[in-house]
Amino acid sequence: MATERLQLPSFHHNVQDWLVHVQGYLANTSANDQQKFNAVVCALPTGVATLVQSTITSPPDSNRFAALKSALLDVYRRPDHHHLQELQTITLGDMRPSILWQQMQQINIRCNTSMPTAVLRSRFLQKLPWEEEEEEEEEEEKEEEEEEEEEEE
C-alpha cells in the first residue's frame, strides 16, 4: 500500500490564514488525524515547532491535529489591543470601500472579544471620505457665512 505524501503550503506567521489553507488542502485527501498531525509538524519551521513543542512531543490520544492547530493559534494569537489598534489605523487609501469593510471584519474576527457589528460599521463609516467631504463643506459654508456677515457690517 503506497502512502500518500502530504505537502502543505509553506508556513507563514499569519497562522490563522495558513491553517485555513492547510485545512482546505487536507480536505481533499484521505489522511487520518495522525497523518494530518504529522504533515503539519513537518511543515513547521524549527523555531515555530519549538513554540508548540509540548503538543508535538506529548500529543493527546485523539484529535491530535485539532490540538496542534489550537496550540499554534494560542501561540500566535495577538492580544485584542493589537487588533483594536489595527482597526483604528486602517485607512481606505486606494481600496474600494467593500474591501476595507472586508478587512475590518477579518481583523474583528481575530479578536478574542469581537466588536459588535453596529460598532464596527460605525467605525467603518467614519473612515469613508464622504464624511470628511461633508465636514469640509460645512466648514466652507460657515466661513462663507462669516465673510458675508463681515461684509454686511
Image (cartoon, rainbow, N blue to C red):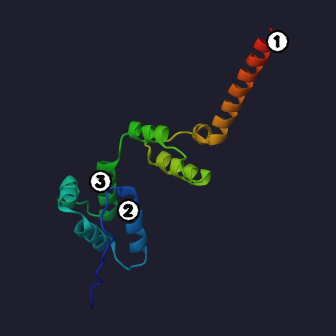
Up/down of 96 relative to 88, above or below: below
Residue that extends furthest to the top in the rendered view of this protein: 153
Tell me where residue 90 appears, x and y as whole percent.
Answer: 49, 43
Read off the residue under disc 2.
19
Q: Quadrant of the C terminus?
A: top right
Give whichever of 122, 62 is nearer the camera. Answer: 122
> Of the residues shown, which amino acid type is indicated by label 1?
Glu
Give the SS element for disc 3: helix
Looking at numbered disc 3 in the image, what kind of residue is underneath it?
A: Ala
- Counting residues from the start of the chain, the first of labels 3 and 1 encountered is 3
Cβ–Cβ under 8 Å for marks 2 and 3: no
Query: Percent position (x, y) of residue 83?
Result: 43, 42
Residue at 55% over, 50% down: 100
- Mark 2 and mark 1 lie on one chain; the one further toward the N terminus is 2
Element type where label 2 sits in the image: helix
Q: Which residue is mark 3?
A: 71
Image quadrant where residue 135 sits: top right
Crowd tier of the residue under label 1, counting other residues whose Cα lies within 10 Å: few below 14, some 14–19, many 20 or above: few
- What quarter of the picture does the N terminus occupy? bottom left
Per the model, the C-alpha gap separating discs 3 and 1 is 73 Å
The residue type indicated by label 2 comes to Leu
Residue where numbered disc 1 is placed: 152
* Position of residue 32 measured from the top left corner of the image (x, y, whole percent): 33, 75
Instruction: Using residue 50 as the reference point, say whether residue 122 is left or right of it.
Output: right
**Given contact means CB atoms under 8 Å apart, are the residues at marks 3 and 1 in contact?**
no
Q: What SS does tag 1 mark?
A: helix
Q: CA distance from mark 2 to mark 3?
A: 12 Å
Task: Between label 3 and label 1, give the one nearer the viewer.
Answer: 1
Say which of marks 2 and 1 sits in front: 1
